[in-house]
Amino acid sequence: MPLRALICWFRNDLRLGDNLALIEACGAAACVLPVYCHDPAADAPTRWGFVRRGPHRRAFLAAALDDLDAQLRARGSRLLQLRGEPAEVLPALARAIGADTVVCEEIAAPEEQDAVAALRAAGLTVRTVWQSSLLDPAALPFAVARLPKVFTDFRRAVEAAGQQPPAPLAAPAVLPPLPAPVVLPPHSLFEPLRMGDRALARASFPWWQPAFAGGERAALAHLARYFAGDLAKHYKATRNGLSGVDFSSKFSPWLAQGALSPRVAFAALRRHEAEQGASEGSYWLWFELLWRDYFRFLHLQHGRRLYRARGLNAAAPPPPHDPAAFAAWCAGRTGHAFIDAGMRELAATGWLSNRMRQVVASYLIHDLGCDWRAGAAWFEAQLVDYDVYSNQGNWLYIAGRGTDPRGGRRFDPDRQ
Ligand code: FAD
């Protein structure tokens, strides 16, 4: 028998299409209240001395929430945005609407899991739904506990098994009504960011332009634009570019906020291949999306052990740290022109190419002798596409504290 009312808690799944948590919520109750929580922790300073979420991601998120709200309204519902820790605001809200159940996306990272545990401790029933990977972890050719230590072995096993991602799920045409009584704020809780910096004009991901704004509709339009031409065909040759819009797909900011489901992106890739032919470039997009999955599955396998200073490498010494060198790195004032260019680009625009991320991360760890966790925290604050799994996984990989037995990765900045 369906519940009278429940809360559908949006997290990193700010979309209606291919959203199993939303579909389950709609099927489980007569009334559904869609909610997003602005946790003040995101805007509070970390142990490294800066906030967790800088202005670029804040603005990109605000656009996604506006888009989600508009799409919900078009289907007879709305998004309630609350400021506060989920464990404080959601139980109170549930009481106000006579509900005791929350449905949400599962996020296999420690703080996100703690948030769910706190809701349960507060007496709520929380149903979590895994939905952020391309492949279904339950259908992998091995148990997640036996995930190969090296990415190439993982990819080969998946490809040998012929594993394909499930088809994306359609967005619900209509949403259940809101439970009464709820007072909904008229607009997003964020102030729009005023842009005045000329450096932004040449950014590789110009998120303040409507075509690159946060949210599902901009994501789908970008996907269609990307696959309409021959960018995917040349992707393998261009993907290590450093600046410009088209050298890589630029899917990651929308994937990170969940405005774009990886299965929707993959379905578009397959359609493109059916229409224009498969190519080395189109294969490489699948390859890179598998990296994204790999870091997710690594979290399912190792959980919070990935967040220790030594990571998974029991033999690794505690990471050294040099606060002055770290501050210079963040500010783009190390004295190495190439590194400084990258770090200034990151702070000014919220974006950095994959190759440049590798180079500056390597420089911080292997040349400046700083703690990899400080670098990961700075990326978290700055990147418009910050994703807990991909960020942690890539930093661990470069630091040599992940699963890869070949040790850390040093990029020679002069050669680069
Ligand atoms: P494309 O080159 O077009 O690739 C297509 C998609 O494949 C990307 O959107 C992404 O989802 C996935 N992908 C590509 N490379 C990687 C990779 N190395 N790891 C995981 N997924 C990948 N990516 C994030 O999304 N969020 C992060 O917070 C993040 N932090 C990073 C930190 C470091 C130190 C490094 C080296 C890489 C990080 N990456 C992160 C991975 C990668 O740099 C970005 O995904 C990529 O640059 C995004 O641009 P794109 O969408 O144009 O990628």
Image (spheres, rainbow, N blue to C red):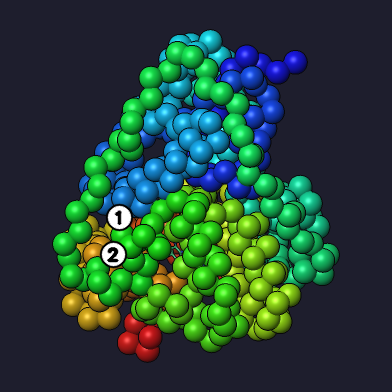
Q: CA distance from mark 1 to mark 2?
A: 7 Å
In primary-sequence order, the first of circles 1 and 2 is 1
Q: Position of residue 314 (x, y in %)?
A: 54, 54
Mark 2 Cβ and ligand 1 under 8 Å apart: no
Q: State if disc 2 and disc 1 touch (CB < 8 Å).
A: yes
**Is 189 left or right of 119, judged from the image as shown?**
left
Q: Closer to the camera, 135 or 297?
A: 135
The secondary structure type at the circle numbered 2 is: helix
Q: Residue 19: which disc?
A: none
Looking at numbered disc 1 in the image, what kind of residue is underneath it?
A: His
Q: Is residue 116 visible?
A: no
- Residue 14 in view of the camera: yes
Question: In the picture provided, is 182 more to the left or to the right than 123?
Answer: left
What residue occupies the far right of the structure in this picture? 161
Q: Position of residue 228 (x, y in %)?
A: 57, 75
Q: Amino acid at mark 2?
A: Thr
Toward the viewer: 224 or 359?
A: 224
Label 1 residue SS: helix
Q: Which residue is mark 1?
A: 56
Q: Picture quarter containing residue 343?
A: bottom left
Instruction: Please give the name of the residue rendered at 67% of the width and 32% of the height, measured from the top-left corner.
Output: 24
Residue visible at 53% across and 10% down in the picture? 98
Q: Position of residue 376 (x, y in %)?
A: 38, 56
Q: Residues within 10 Å of mark 2 (few under 14, many from 20)?
A: many
Q: To which quarter of the image does residue 414 belong?
A: bottom left
- The correct choice, above or below, for 343 with respect to 33 in the image is below
**Residue under circle 2?**
349
Asked if residue 413 is positioned above or below residue 365 in the image, the reply reads below
Residue 6 position within the rendered picture, expressed as x and y whole percent measured from the top left: 58, 21
Q: Residue at x 63, y 39 (%)?
A: 173
Q: Neighbour class for label 1 at 10 Å: few (<14), some, many (≥20)? A: many
